[in-house]
Amino acid sequence: MDLLIPIVCIIFGLFVGIVASRFGIGGAIITIPFFRIVFGLSGQAAIATALPITIPTALAGAFVFHKKKLIKYKTAITAGIFGSIFSVFGAYFTTFFTSSQLMILTSFMFFGLAYMISQEKKKEEKVEPASLFRKATASIFIGCIAGFASGFLGIGGGVILVPLLLAIRHIPLRRAIPTSLATMSIYAIPGALAHYSLGNVNTDLLAFVLMGSIIGAHLGAERTIRMEEKHLKEMFVTFLVFLGIVLLVNELFHILGILK
C-alpha cells in the first residue's frame, strides 16, 4: 500500500472524529463520500467500511460528554437496543439496490435532514412527555428508524437521531448530541457485523481512518460543550447540504460516464 494512503486516511479520520462528536453523528456521512469518491469503492463497500468507524468514534465522544453528565442513558439504551435489531435488517436490505441508487438515496436524505433541522425551533422551552410509557414508546420508535437507516445507508444514524430526539422527545440539542453518540455506539455493532459478514468491509482503509477518528472525537466533544446551539445547527445544516451536493454530483457523473 502506498505510504500516502495511510497518512491521508489518518488525517481524514481526525477530521471525521471532530465533526462527528460536534454534531452527535457517527461520522459515516463524511466517510461514505470519502471512500466512494477518493478511493472509488462501490456503494456497498463504502457503506460497509464507514459504519464500523461509528463505534469507537461515538464511544470516544460519548465518554467526554459522560463526564459532564449530559447523556440521557435510559433513552440511549432503549433506542440502542431496538436500533440494533433494525440495523441488521437495513444492512441486508442494501443487497436489493445498486451502488448508485444507494448513494443517490443517501444524498437526498442529507437534503431532507438539512431542511428538517433548519426548520427546527428552539426546544429548550418545551417540556418532555410526562408519561414514562410515552417516553419509552418514542425512544423505541426513534431507535427503529435510526437503526434501520444506520444499516441500510451505512451511517451511524446520528443525522437522524439528533433531529428525532429534538422533534419527538424534545431533548435540548446539548443533550441530544451526546445521547445520540451513546445510542449509536450500541446499535452500530450488529449492523457493522452484518456488513462484514457480506464481505464488503475494506479493513485496510478502516484501520487507518479509525486511528485519527478516535483522537478527533475527543477533541470535537470538548469544543461542542462550549459552543452555542445556534451555531451548531447552522454548521450542521450547511455541512449536510454540502455533502449531499458532492455525493449527488459524483454519482451523476458516474452514471453519465464522465467519471469511470
Image (cartoon, rainbow, N blue to C red):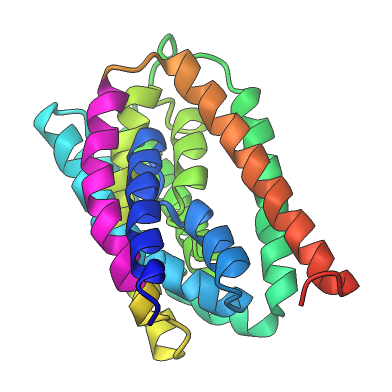
For the point 32% across and 49% down, the residue is 14
- Horizontal placement of 239 versus 170: left or right? right
Q: Residue 185, located in which quarter of the rendered image? A: bottom left
Q: How many marks?
A: 0
Question: Within the magenta stretch, is there residue 219?
Answer: yes
Residue farthest to the front, as pictured: 3
Residue farthest to the top, as pictured: 125
- Horizontal placement of 109 versus 158: left or right? right
Q: Tell me residue 236's x, y (percent).
A: 53, 32
Is residue 260 or residue 235 the one in the foreground?
260
Question: Within the magenta stretch, is there residue 142?
Answer: no
Q: Quadrant of the N terminus?
A: bottom left
Residue farthest to the left, as pictured: 67
For the point 75% across and 56% down, the residue is 248
Q: Residue 25, located in which quarter of the rendered image? A: top left
Principal secondary structure, stretch drawn in magenta: helix
For the point 60% across and 40% down, the residue is 240
In this rendering, is residue 170 above or below 65?
above
In this rendering, is residue 18 above or below 143?
above
Is residue 97 or residue 73 the one in the foreground?
97
Q: Which residues are magenta?
A: 206-225
Q: Tell me residue 17's x, y (percent).
A: 33, 47
Q: Tell me residue 181's x, y (percent).
A: 31, 45
For the point 43% across and 73% down, the residue is 49
One can see residue 81 in this view: no
Q: Tell me residue 129's x, y (percent).
A: 39, 26
Q: Residue 133, located in which quarter of the rendered image? A: top left
Q: Quadrant of the C terminus?
A: bottom right
In this rendering, is residue 224 above or below 186?
above
One can see residue 174 in this view: yes
